[in-house]
């Protein structure tokens, strides 16, 4: 069998699996899989919108659409836009999570009426990171705007809390001295910190808006869920299985055995 024949056979296997999942779910299924192999990483970005729109137009208006999702994350506003795009074409939106739906993937799940997770399914915190020209450069990589380390917003909050509560810096003078030390290491550090801090209220707004799509005006419950996912999990690589996701208050449904096998 040639390489081309093997590729065609693999494509047909995937098509058959998608067809079987659609039959189990009684719904059309759109697959969104981003790469996580070393040097072949891809992430959720705005270029998914025209591709999703093309598929959705072929499907047409329907009662249900299922999104099969595998991703380590991406641009939060792109995830927000994808949810609203899909909801333009259906009354009920579900996300199928066979394995990883981290970061922006979890944000997408917040906009779903139902999150179907297998036993290996993983969600994660939604605290955002920013990447801009003011961020620290990646060690050993030639300087370039795109070659900077991402900065996590909650790390900034932790830095301030460390300075105030653990190290014991008091008042404006103490915090000024901490920022001055950062500036000596990187003259653009205050700008990078400011850019990262700006996205903190944005993630709260996005997550709140997505949950309101199916939770209505349950403001206290929505705020509790958003606070947990955006602020309380300790680190961005924290993993949330389906039992914990249910405990948090997400609309998680266990994938039946036959569906889990197909996923």
Image (cartoon, helix red, strand yellow):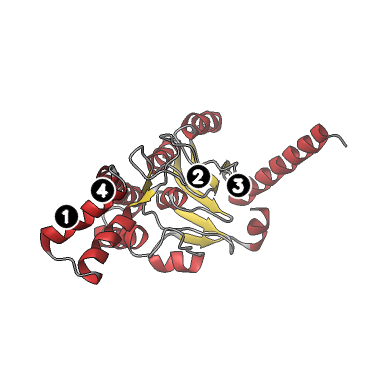
The label nearer to you, 3 versus 2, is: 2
Would you name the residue on which mark 3 appears? 38
Which percent across, then down, holds residue 218? 27, 58
Which percent across, then down, holds residue 263? 63, 53
Q: CA distance from mark 4 to mark 3?
A: 33 Å
Which image quadrant for residue 147? top left
The reply to whether discs 4 and 1 touch (Cβ–Cβ < 8 Å) is no
Would you name the residue on which mark 1 appears? 176
What residue do we see at 36% from left, 37% from top?
133
Would you name the residue on which mark 2 appears? 140
The label nearer to you, 1 versus 3, is: 1
Report helix, strand or loop for mark 1. Answer: helix
Q: CA distance from mark 4 to mark 1?
A: 10 Å
Q: CA distance from mark 3 to mark 2?
A: 17 Å
Would you name the residue on which mark 4 appears? 183
Q: Is residue 228 left or right of residue 13?
A: left
């Amino acid at each position: 069998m040639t390489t081309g024949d093997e590729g065609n056979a693999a494509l047909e296997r995937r098509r058959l699996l998608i067809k079987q999942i659609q039959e189990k779910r009684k719904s059309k299924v759109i697959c969104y899989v981003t790469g996580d192999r070393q040097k072949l990483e891809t992430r959720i970005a705005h270029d998914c919108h025209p591709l999703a729109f093309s598929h959705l137009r072929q499907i047409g208006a329907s009662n249900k659409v299922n999104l099969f999702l595998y991703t380590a994350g991406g641009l939060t506003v792109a995830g927000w836009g994808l949810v609203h795009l899909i909801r333009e074409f259906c009354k009920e939106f579900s996300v199928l999570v066979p394995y990883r739906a981290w970061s922006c993937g979890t944000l997408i799940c917040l906009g779903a009426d139902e999150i179907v997770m297998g036993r290996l399914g993983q969600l994660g915190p939604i605290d955002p990171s920013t990447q801009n020209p003011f961020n620290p450069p990646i060690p050993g990589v030639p300087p370039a705007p795109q070659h900077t380390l991402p900065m996590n917003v909650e790390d900034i909050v932790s830095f301030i809390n460390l300075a105030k509560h653990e190290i014991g810096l008091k008042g404006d003078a103490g915090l000024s001295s901490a920022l001055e030390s950062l500036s000596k290491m990187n003259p653009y550090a205050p700008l990078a910190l400011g850019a990262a801090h700006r996205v903190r209220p944005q993630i709260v707004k996005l997550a709140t808006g997505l949950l309101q799509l199916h939770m209505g005006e349950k403001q206290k419950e929505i705020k509790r869920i958003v606070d947990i996912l955006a602020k309380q999990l300790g680190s961005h690589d924290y993993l949330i299985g389906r039992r914990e996701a249910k405990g948090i208050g997400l609309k998680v449904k266990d994938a039946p055995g036959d569906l889990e096998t197909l996923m």
